[in-house]
Image (cartoon, rainbow, N blue to C red):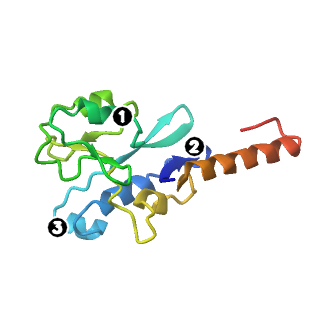
Amino acid sequence: MPREILIDFARCTGCLSCRLACAVAHTQAKSLFDAVLAGEKPRARIFVHQLGQQKAPINCRHCTDAPCLDACMAGAMYRKEDGTVTNEGGEQRCVGCWMCVMVCPYGAITSDAAGTVALKCDRNCRDESGTPACVRACPTGALVYTEVEDYSAHRRHGALGKILAGGAGAP
């Protein structure tokens, strides 16, 4: 089963470390200082928003039934063999119609610095262990890269522990 970037919303402090790591990982220099010196304009592919007191990272979910794939009239969006939905290499095909932006249920697609090409998580930031930059950079562990069933089992175990300890119930 493929691994996914999953979020423990209660752990997010809104520090933006994930955004910075994402942006830097997608530069030629692979270093913030060097990218700035080279005149690169790094763009993050993950967003952090706040609703009330809760902060939350939002990124592409690489949906099984990805609406952006069907909406892309130029065929720039496609699914890689590992399940990642991307337009990597499709920059020449992207016509900037923004249909993908309009249909994405998470608002996880934006434009490049020039405002001409769609930009989204492509998971091209993974290290030798396969972990994405945003997950590696998260100081609180709010972002995890794991299999869905493992994450679900961990959540069930935590809920059961609270119930058995006499807590107010599951999280």
Disc 1 versus disc 3: distance between alpha carbons? 30 Å
The residue tagged 3 is 38
> In the rendered structure, which disc, 1 or 3, sits on the residue that comes first in sequence?
3
Q: Nearer the viewer, residue 144 or 39?
A: 144
User: What kind of element bears circle 3?
Assistant: loop
Determine whether the residue tagged by mark 2 lies in a helix, strand or loop. Answer: helix
Q: Which residue in the structure is indicated by mark 1? A: 107
Residue 82 in the image, given as x and y percentages of width and height: 38, 54
Residue at horizontal 31%, vertical 51%? 80
Packing grade of label 3 (10 A; few <14, some 14-19, many >=20) is few
Q: Nearer the viewer, mark 3 or mark 2?
A: 2
Q: Horizontally, is 169 left or right of 105 in the view?
A: right
Q: Quadrant of the C terminus?
A: top right
**Amino acid under label 1?**
Gly
Whole-percent x, y for residue 114 in the image? 14, 45
User: Who comes first in sequence, dot 3 or dot 2?
Assistant: 2
Q: Residue 94 in the image: x percent, y percent?
A: 14, 41
Q: Residue at horizontal 87%, vertical 44%?
A: 164
Residue depicted at 40% across the width and 34% down the height = 106
Number of the label disc, if any, that sits on residue 9: 2
Mark 2–mark 1 distance (CA, rounded to whole Å): 17 Å
Q: Nearer the viewer, mark 1 or mark 3?
A: 1
Callout 3, which amino acid?
Ala
Q: Earlier in the sequence, mark 2 or mark 1?
A: 2
| Image location of residue 108, percent across then percent down | 35, 39
